[in-house]
Image (spheres, helix red, strand yellow):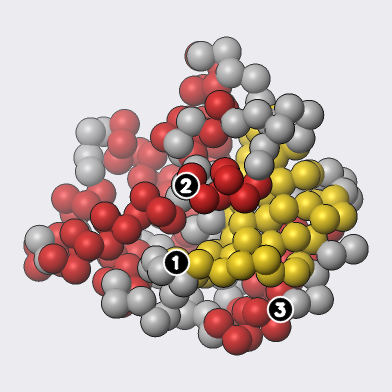
């Protein structure tokens, strides 16, 4: 898993470098894919597949005094205005350059955050029962199946009993899923096709699933921690 994580870390660090250089990573994708209707459909679907999607906020129901953990945060603090949620924002990401960029964003705008930390989902630097609500969006598709099981255990450790959690994996039944995997591979972020049944078996001992949204390219689970 270390080699896979290193590739993902490098890919996201490179995305930050490209942003500062004025380069759109999509401009480097092969022309046939970049101009395809399938990619256009995929990008239109993306709004429902980010950490700040309205249904995520509606389910998590952030309130003042809650501690919110955003795992694999990327640029969610800035792009999706997660600092406006009524909770204390904590985030981890595997990319040091993404964490540095979000730290600078928060400091420049004097946005209070609980912490922004470089870490992987399988090794979260927090104590047990630390968080009330958590999002793990766009993360597990980069992890091998055995690592996913370990990561879910680590996530379960750091959330409180009955904590609300939103997490996702690729929806292998969705018409855009092959395009998504193709795009991710072009961007140096080759994903893993997780079996839905296997993933749900991994979830079952740790989280109760209140509902599952299978409408989009990412299969999204709305859960509570069982402890």
Locate residue 35, reporting x and y percent. Answer: 10, 61
| Mark drawn on residue 141 | none
Determine whether the residue tagged by mark 3 lies in a helix, strand or loop. Answer: helix
Is 183 placed above or below 116 here?
below
Q: CA distance from mark 1 to mark 2?
A: 12 Å
Is residue 172 among what the camera can see?
yes
Q: Quadrant of residue 110?
A: top right
Q: CA distance from mark 3 to mark 2?
A: 25 Å
Image label count: 3
Q: Which residue is mark 3?
A: 202
Q: Which residue is mark 2?
A: 53
Locate residue 188, reporting x and y percent. Answer: 36, 62
Q: Residue at 60% of width from left, 31% of height from top?
A: 85
Locate residue 145, reporting x and y percent. Answer: 61, 79
Packing grade of label 1 (10 A; few <14, some 14-19, many >=20) is many
Packing grade of label 2 (10 A; few <14, some 14-19, many >=20) is few
Q: Residue at 47% of width from left, 47% of height from top?
A: 53
Q: Quadrant of residue 84?
A: top right
Question: Considering only order in the chain, which callout, 2 or 1, is on the residue closer to the N terminus?
Answer: 2
Determine whether the residue tagged by mark 1 lies in a helix, strand or loop. Answer: strand
Q: CA distance from mark 1 to mark 3?
A: 18 Å
Question: Considering only order in the chain, which callout, 2 or 3, is on the residue closer to the N terminus?
Answer: 2
- The quarter of the picture where the C terminus appears is bottom right
CB contact under 8 Å: marks 1 and 3: no
Foreground label between 3 and 2 = 2
- The quarter of the picture where the N terminus appears is bottom right
Q: Residue at 45% of width from left, 36% of height from top?
A: 80
Q: Which residue is mark 1?
A: 218
195 lies left or right of 15: right
Instruction: In this rendered view, identify the residue nearer to me: 157 or 62.
Output: 62
């Amino acid at each position: 898993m270390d080699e896979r994580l290193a590739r993902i870390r490098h890919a996201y660090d490179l995305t930050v470098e490209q942003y500062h250089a004025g380069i759109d990573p999509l401009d480097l994708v092969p022309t046939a894919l970049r101009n395809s209707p399938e990619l256009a459909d995929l990008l239109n679907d993306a709004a429902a597949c980010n950490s700040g999607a309205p249904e995520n906020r509606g389910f998590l129901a952030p309130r003042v005094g809650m501690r919110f953990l955003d795992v694999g945060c990327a640029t969610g603090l800035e792009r999706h205005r997660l600092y406006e949620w009524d909770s204390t924002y904590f985030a981890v990401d595997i990319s040091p350059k993404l964490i540095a960029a979000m730290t600078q964003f928060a400091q420049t705008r004097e946005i209070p955050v609980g912490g922004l930390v470089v870490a992987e989902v399988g090794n979260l630097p927090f104590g047990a029962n630390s968080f009330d609500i958590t999002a793990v969006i766009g993360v597990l598709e980069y992890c091998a199946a055995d690592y996913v099981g370990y990561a879910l255990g680590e996530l379960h450790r750091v959330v409180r009993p009955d904590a609300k959690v939103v997490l996702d994996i690729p929806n292998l039944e969705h018409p855009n899923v092959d395009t998504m995997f193709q795009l991710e591979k072009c961007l140096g972020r080759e994903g893993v096709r997780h079996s839905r049944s296997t993933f749900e078996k991994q979830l079952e001992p740790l989280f109760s699933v209140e509902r599952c949204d299978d409408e989009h390219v990412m299969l999204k689970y709305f859960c509570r921690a069982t402890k």
